[in-house]
Image (cartoon, rainbow, N blue to C red):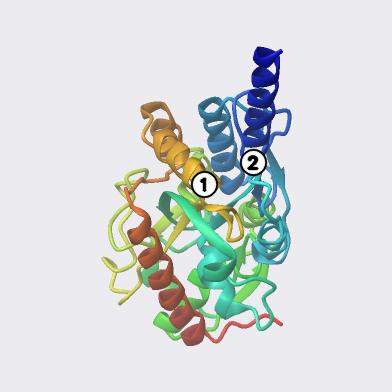
Amino acid sequence: MRRRLLLASTLLATGAALAQMPSQGSSRPLKIVVPFGAGTTTDIVGRILADALGRQLGVAAIVENKPGAGGSIGSEQVARAGTDGQTLLLGTVGTHAINPSLYKRLSYQPLRDFVPLGFVGATPTLLVVPAGSPWKNVADLGRATGNVNFASAGNGTSGHLAGELLNVRLSKSFMHVPYRDGAQAMTELMAGNVQFMFYHPAAVLPQVRAGKLRALGVSSAKRSAAAPDVPTLMEQGVKDFDLVAWFMLYAPGSMPAAQRDRLREATRQVLAQPEVREKLALQGVERTEMNADQLDAFARAEIAKWGEAVQRSGAQID
């Protein structure tokens, strides 16, 4: 009888512990919310992470796309997810660095409502035009006259802010045209309905190689490993233009420390795997190792940096 009671109490204790976090054999899947549409670079990166984290933790892992309001809708959902330890967010430079300054009334606070689990990586954006465009470089674009429109994957995205900052740097007034997502924006660009856009290398380079788009420049301070032949905007005389899109895996700020630490360690191990790095590199995402203190410092610096970019551009969304 004693052995049975001991076994029963052990099983109860084990069951209670397992219920507190994702673990081997859990019937509840780990969910990564991607706050943008399916097929976007963010979505692809999210699915790479979900697959690898699921295998690492021994649980089912799914991606839930929750687009809208520059990623704010999906981000708010995770911020309010509570303490179940099952719901994470693939945040971006838009959701966690741009939106706090761009939106007058934001439903979450990045530093209060989220805890970073791991820096997934960063990618510059490419300034691209239709293949039939008369512009061969950024200087040509700077001399453009008449109505010039630029596309983006939506208000508040890094492509939107890059275009607004280009207006400031070139003393131009190019008109912003937001689309539902990046795929729609590229389709309109290739059709000639808009004149240029900033977007991720993984999405635009196939169209560049197919002869449908032309890359004029890179938004980062250094050239992109995915497109080493394309000069940066700063190389072409555009001062202080260093903008990159980035991805960070976040947990809700209310998640208990034990669950958070376990997920952070699993994320660290996943991002160190060569096959995961290779898959991310194919999306133009370049990895940088950061510990917890560096993650916090990076997040604060990015909010300040992009806040200044928003202020200089004059962009604002109610």
The number of numbered badges drawn on the structure is: 2
Quadrant housing residue 39: top right
Q: Residue, x 36% and y 46% (percent of image)?
A: 286
For residue 9, above or below residue 82: above
Name the secondary structure under disc 1: helix
Horizontally, is 193 left or right of 118 in the view? right
Neighbour tally class for label 1: few under 14, some 14-19, many 20 plus, Cα within 10 Å: few
Res. 167 visible in picture: no
The percent position of residue 15, horizontal first and vertical second, equals: 68, 30
Neighbour tally class for label 2: few under 14, some 14-19, many 20 plus, Cα within 10 Å: some
User: Pointer 1: what residue?
Assistant: 258
Mark sitting on residue 70: none
Horizontally, is 300 left or right of 36 in the view? left
In the rendered view of the protein, which quadrant contains the C terminus? bottom right
Horizontally, is 44 left or right of 245 in the view? right
Give the residue type that dot 2 points to.
Gln
